Image (spheres, rainbow, N blue to C red):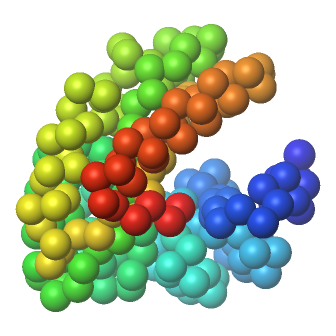
Amino acid sequence: MGFSTAKGGFGGLRSIIGYAIKANNNLKILEHLRELGCGAVLVSGNELRLALRAGFDPTRCIFNGNGKLLEDLVLAAQEGVFVNVDSEFDLDNIISAARIAGKKVNVLLRINPDVDPQVHPYVATGNKNSKFGIRNEKLQWFLDAVKAHPNELKLVGVHCHLGSTITKVDIFRDAAVLMVNYIDEIRAQGFEIVT
């Protein structure tokens, strides 16, 4: 499936289709994807710098991963990049980065929806055995932590990653239903989820 097909599939929904810079960091390819309207998914400060060099709008970039460095988070905060919260440790670093940068960070919570992606366990990241993402029983703790830091954090969305090499569409549908339920639960607590 090409980018245009994927983009068309989302109709008028507010979404960011992000290209993982780690997949291919060729500047010309990145510039072409940006021209098509693609956003960028980043896992390091160097990838953020490359995305900016390729002309990506920082507000269409998402900083992801459970190994984000404080100095990279500071750069992301300064540039206005969306940042996924992956863990308690990650949240603490994002709060510190916001304070250092003097800017509120737009964050998304990486929720582990506990969906079986029916792939090899090494590439499954959205099931109960995965170390990635926020489990249902910890979600309220993270929501309370975001509420406790209104000068540093603004919760604007949620995110999930199920795994690689998924071949069954039903798995994505099941995860989408769960994520919509999480969004409803989060909105009921007064958060304005926009993406």
Image quadrant assignment for residue 51: bottom right
Between residues 49 and 37, which one lies in front from this camera angle?
37
Q: Residue at x 57, y 84 (%)?
A: 57
Image quadrant assignment for residue 112: top left
Between residues 134 and 29, which one lies in front from this camera angle?
134
Residue 93: % across, % down:
15, 60
In this rendering, the answer to whether 174 lies above or below 185 is above
Asked if one can make out residue 32 in the rendered structure from this viewpoint, the answer is no
Between residues 169 and 64, which one lies in front from this camera angle?
169
Q: Residue at x 56, y 74 (%)?
A: 60
Asked if one can make out residue 100 in the rendered structure from this viewpoint, the answer is yes
Q: Residue at x 16, y 61 (%)?
A: 147
Between residues 57 and 173, which one lies in front from this camera angle?
173
Residue 183: % across, % down:
45, 46
Q: Residue at x 60, y 55 (%)?
A: 20
Q: Is residue 2 left or right of residue 190?
A: right
Image quadrant assignment for residue 76: bottom left
Q: Is residue 62 left or right of residue 119?
A: left
Residue 165: % across, % down:
69, 26
In this rendering, the answer to whether 12 lies above or below 129 is below
Task: Report how many numbered discs are placed on residues in the image.
Answer: 0
Residue 44: % across, % down:
39, 62
Q: Is residue 118 left or right of residue 132?
A: right
